[in-house]
Amino acid sequence: MNAVIESLTKACKTDSGVLALINVDNFALFNDIYGMECGDKVIQKCIQVIDKVTEGDDIKASLGGDEFVVFAKNLKDKGELIAMTAYINEKLAYYITDLVGADNTVSLGVSTGAVFVPEYGDSYEDLFHKADKALATAKQIGNHGCSFYEPSPRDREMVYDIGKITEKLDEDSELRGAMWLDSVYFGIVYRYIRRYLSTYGEDAAKMLITLDLTADNIGEEHFHQIVKEFGKVVVSALRRSDVVFQSRSNQFFLLLPKMNEEYIDKMSSRIKKKFREAGLDDVMDIDISYELIISKKEDEM
């Protein structure tokens, strides 16, 4: 890795082009659902595709985990990097379908943050920070996109009112049950909660609920509708602090903060009871699996 950093530092000083950070969106969530073996295969596929889409003298490396860095020499057109990101996402989409099946609902792909060199400096550390800011922008706009660093304008006419902002963000306090999110928003909330847990040493649990059809007289479309309706029952049985998303056509993935083994057994029993009360045990089976997340505070690590 030191040799790569040295090469990037030298390139930023002497060459023109683009320094880009490429991050796999929702990778932690994908890993938790499909396992580290599948996750490792995705990372290897990313390395292959990035290597294929870049030039031979470009500098590219894995930064560990789900992030990669590329210095694309002599690249001056934003459209080229946007097209590169789209190509990586296209290849990943096909690969993920082959790897885990077409009903995967984890929105897996890459986002890219980039900065032009030497327009915005020649220090690798400073340029890395700017590319990272651009990557954060790409994530905020929506996963699987490409964003470029630009200096932030000072908008002195903007008035910030904490009350008005809070009013727009607050949800109805009367709402009950867990938050049911799509895969993109679930991934954002999931990453935040995992950070919170590790920062403050809180424990939690991950739960996977799988429903399998056993009756012959129910069609696939009707089955999927029943599953979706049961998902609403699951949401109502959980706490407001819990988060749910439908990870596959017959599965729900749950993140349950402040959860220990005693409480999660009770919650599993409650969900199974709701399942029986809905009369679903006559037409399908339910399987509930879970893993505890035991966190240590960052200052204790």
Image (cartoon, grey):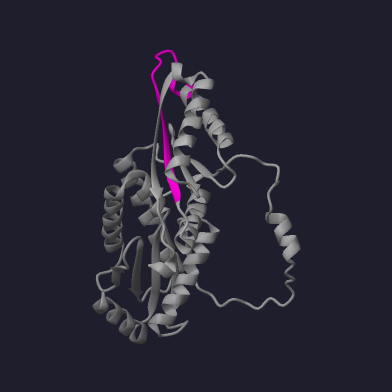
Judging depth in this view, the residue of 226 and 219 nearest the camera is: 226
Residue found at the very far front of the displayed protein = 262
Q: Is residue 19 visible?
A: yes
Q: Position of residue 129 (x, y in %)?
A: 45, 76
Picture layout, residue 274 above or below residue 74:
above
The residue lying at 49 percent from left, 71 percent from top is 133
Query: Where residue 211 sits: x, y (%)?
Result: 42, 28
Quarter of the image with the C terminus is bottom left
Q: Which one is in front, 230 or 127?
A: 230
Q: Is residue 249 left or right of residue 7?
A: right
Q: In the rendered structure, does residue 207 fall within the stretch colored magenta?
A: yes
Q: Residue at coordinates 27% horizontally, 53% vertically from top-left?
A: 40
135 over 235 or under it: above or below? below
Q: Is residue 117 visible?
A: no
- Whether residue 263 is in magenta: the answer is no
Q: Is residue 191 left or right of residue 54?
A: right
* Residue 57 drawn at (x, y percent): 26, 74
**101 in relation to 219, above or below:** below
Q: In the rendered view of the protein, which quadrant contains the N terminus?
A: bottom left
Instruction: Identify the magenta region.
Output: 204-222
**Looking at the image, which residue is at 47% across and 76% down?**
130
